[in-house]
Amino acid sequence: MDVLRAIETRRSIGRVRQDPVPREDIELVLESAVHAPNHKITEPWRFHVFVGRGRGELARARAELALRMAEAEGEEEDLIPGRVSRERKKAFRSPLVVAVISRAGRDEVETRENYAACCAAVQNMQLAAHARGLACMWRTGPVAYHPFMREFFGLGEGDEIVAYLYIGYPDVDLRPRRRRPAREHTTWHEG
Ligand SMILES: Cc1cc2nc3c(=O)[nH]c(=O)nc-3n(C[C@H](O)[C@H](O)[C@H](O)COP(=O)(O)O)c2cc1C
């Protein structure tokens, strides 16, 4: 698929089928990530691939996170099991989930630029997946930012969970994209 067409036609799609994604396509998506620009070639990305039954690990972490959050928020006792169960199930929304982690740099600027490079990597992954007929949803939220999940992945200071990319074959029709044209956000400096 032509890159401009891929950019134009990609959509975030949350509803996907459970059909497995072929291993070679998973690897192609991961390879596309490492082609992203990264300043000083720090190659800051780390990937955790949760696939098939391996999603259980993520599900258990999500359940534990939900329990801790519910307790910290003083959630009513009888509502907690439902909340934990809903969070656990979210790990199985797609046949494949890739967590993308950005490693800390040697100083604050490098850490920031590493994060930026990982965002570029995630978009490469989304476009590569799209070119293979796969749908993606970049998800974050507490599962990306809570200290418990940082601990789960063994992150240190400055490391970040950039994205959970939920990937599978689309199960819905594409929505039209809503965007204002670039000219509304652009100032030209032409001398
Ligand atoms: C940093 C980042 C975090 C996101 N987190 C979520 C999320 O937690 N849940 C979600 O439904 N979508 C999430 N998205 C996807 C956006 O909602 C999506 O890109 C937006 O709706 C535009 O749709 P499009 O990608 O089809 O153009 C995230 C996107 C980015 C860039």
Image (cartoon, rainbow, N blue to C red):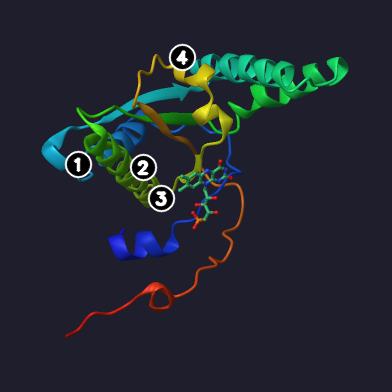
- Measuring from the top left, give residue 185's x and y in whole percent: 41, 72
The local secondary structure at tag 2 comes to: helix
Q: Please name the residue shown 52% across and 37% down the image.
A: 140
Establish if 46 lies above or below 54.
Answer: below
Amino acid at pointer 1: Asn
Q: Position of residue 132 (x, y in %)?
A: 38, 47
- Residue 161, compared with residue 134, is above or below; it is above
The response on whether ligand 1 sits within 8 Å of label 3 is: no
Q: Answer with left or right where residue 124 lies relative to residue 51.
A: left
- Depth check: 128 or 44 in front? 44
* Residue annotated with mark 2: 122
Location of residue 156 in the rendering, given as x and y in whole percent from the top left corner: 35, 18
Q: CA distance from mark 3 to mark 2?
A: 12 Å
Image location (x, y in percent) of residue 153: 42, 17
Q: Is residue 173 left or right of residue 12?
A: right
| Residue of label 3 | 130
Q: Which tag is nearer the camera, tag 2 or tag 4?
A: 4
In the rendered image, is residue 12 in sight? yes
Q: Nearer the viewer, mark 3 or mark 2?
A: 2
First along the sequence among labels 1 and 4: 1
Labels 4 and 3: the sequence-earlier one: 3
Q: Amino acid at mark 2?
A: Val
- SS under mark 4: helix
